[in-house]
């Protein structure tokens, strides 16, 4: 009971200061899938209760009713390269998927080692995607390295025509070709492409920040990124959260608010997090600082996550959850009214303890806003509230709640 009293006191103190209160409900994790082959992502169309799981080797599998379906939703294994950090790296459903059947993938081509973004269309009534429906959106040449391919793709809420694409710097240490700072390169960037047409290719949105500037690719939305791994849009606000994997000193999270015109330079390779990159770093005018960063004693490869907007965890709304691949740790924090990080929590033991999950390759959000943690070892865990027996006691006008804590059965 004392812990619950302390929680109420903290909540009252936060309210007095205009801060976000700590979580009002304990977290737990429930295993929802095992036996997957190097899963890298989980997503779903809006409003869809299923979960679509991306495997590195080129399969997209469907988790429905707690069961991974035997037949893949999409099979690109014949064309996906899997060496190093290559693979099937991204999946995004068109905002109008329920009516047009469109979805997009990002993968590294087995034959050319180039990054490929393609559109596929699910035929009406079909349970799997016909690969003959493929339409190539863009091909991005890659240097002869097997790392830093990023691969996230998504639509910002309220921006149904434009697909955002995250690209890594192409690999090797210290970005030897200086791709991330080169405005003529598509690597180390976030791109924004108009994919609303019915054919192959794309259009450049006229509102992109560098349109009309000499020697700058008009597809660019942001630059200065090393390997942005698992970005996300806040489904409620449209804010863009960018997690960029560091090299040897800092892991970082950047935040771009909805309505921002874009054009930010997040600093790599000049900076790693907020410091000059050891050995090769420097500075430049107008670099954008991360909203949060951590050092290598905490973790060594950040995995970006989501702002929780799900239906079931009391007090979690608005908290950002993220992980670290190497450390297999899960964290969360809130922001105060000034946009500063508060109430940073290590949620590893509460959510992942006893699940067997190792190597957080992704967090995922389904069509209803529920959050998941994806392990490279084939385990997927759902983020859930801890079951509790709650009672209210009135004492001196103060309502005090306590819980008989117990672990959620693993399923």
Image (cartoon, grey):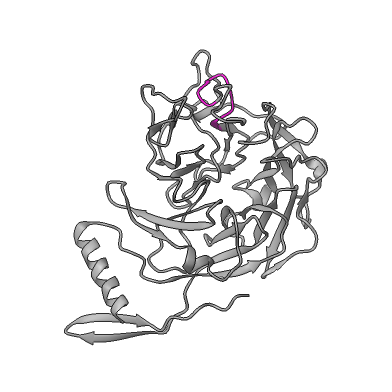
State the extent of the magenta-drawn residues as a range: 180-191
Name the residue: 53% across, 77% down. 408
Residue 121 point in image, percent of width and height? 74, 45
Residue 163 point in image, percent of width and height? 58, 38
Position of residue 44 relative to residue 183, above or below, is below
Q: Quadrant of the C terminus?
A: bottom right
Q: Quadrant of the N terminus?
A: bottom left
> Which secondary structure type mostly characterizes the magenta part of the structure?
loop
Q: Quadrant of residue 73?
A: bottom right
Q: Nearer the viewer, residue 212 or 31?
A: 31
Name the residue: 38% across, 23% down. 283
Position of residue 85 relative to residue 350, above or below, is above
Residue 372 point in image, percent of width and height? 56, 60
Name the residue: 64% across, 55% down. 376
Residue 275 point in image, percent of width and height? 38, 33
Q: Is residue 366 visible?
A: no
Q: Left or right of 122: which side holds 257? A: left
Q: Is residue 233 visible?
A: yes
- In the rendered structure, does residue 183 fall within the stretch colored magenta? yes
Q: Quadrant of residue 178?
A: top right
Q: Left or right of 243: which side holds 63? A: right
Position of residue 199 relative to residue 253, above or below, is above
Name the residue: 31% across, 76% down. 3
Q: Nearer the viewer, residue 330 or 327?
A: 327
């Amino acid at each position: 009971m004392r812990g619950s009293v302390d929680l109420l006191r903290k909540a009252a103190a936060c309210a007095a200061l205009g801060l976000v209160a700590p979580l009002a409900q304990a977290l737990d994790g429930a295993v929802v899938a095992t036996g997957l082959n190097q899963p890298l992502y989980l997503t779903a169309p809006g409003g869809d209760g299923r979960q679509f799981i991306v495997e590195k080797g080129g399969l997209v599998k469907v988790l429905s009713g707690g069961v991974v379906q035997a037949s893949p939703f999409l099979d690109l294994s014949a064309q996906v390269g899997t060496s190093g950090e290559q693979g099937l790296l991204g999946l995004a459903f068109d905002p109008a998927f329920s009516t047009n059947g469109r979805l997009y993938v990002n993968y590294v081509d087995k034959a050319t080692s180039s990054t490929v973004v393609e559109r596929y269309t699910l035929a009406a009534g079909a349970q799997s995607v016909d690969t003959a429906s493929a339409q190539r959106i863009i091909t991005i040449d890659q240097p002869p390295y097997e790392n830093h391919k990023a691969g996230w793709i998504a639509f910002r809420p309220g921006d149904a025509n434009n697909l955002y694409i995250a690209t890594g710097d192409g690999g090797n240490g210290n970005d030897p070709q200086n791709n991330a700072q080169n405005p003529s390169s598509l690597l180390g960037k976030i791109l924004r492409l108009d994919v609303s047409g019915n054919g192959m290719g794309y259009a450049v949105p006229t509102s992109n920040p560098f349109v009309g500037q000499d020697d700058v690719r008009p597809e660019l939305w942001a630059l200065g990124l090393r390997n942005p791994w698992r970005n996300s849009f806040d489904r409620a606000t449209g804010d863009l959260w960018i997690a960029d994997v560091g090299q040897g000193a800092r892991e970082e999270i950047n935040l771009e608010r909805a309505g921002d015109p874009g054009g930010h330079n997040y600093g790599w390779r000049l900076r790693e997090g907020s410091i000059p990159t050891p050995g090769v770093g420097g500075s430049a005018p107008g670099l954008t600082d991360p909203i949060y960063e951590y050092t290598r004693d905490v973790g060594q490869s950040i995995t970006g996550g989501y702002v929780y907007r799900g239906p079931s965890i009391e007090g979690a709304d608005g908290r950002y959850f993220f992980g670290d691949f190497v450390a297999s740790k899960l964290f969360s924090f809130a922001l105060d009214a000034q946009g500063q990080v508060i109430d940073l929590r290590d949620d590893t033991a509460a959510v992942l303890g006893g699940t067997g999950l190792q190597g957080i390759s992704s967090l995922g959000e389904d069509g209803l806003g529920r959050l998941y943690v994806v392990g490279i070892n084939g385990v997927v865990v759902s983020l859930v509230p801890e079951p509790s027996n709650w009672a209210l006691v009135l004492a001196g006008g103060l309502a005090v709640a306590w819980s008989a804590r117990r672990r959620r059965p693993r399923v």
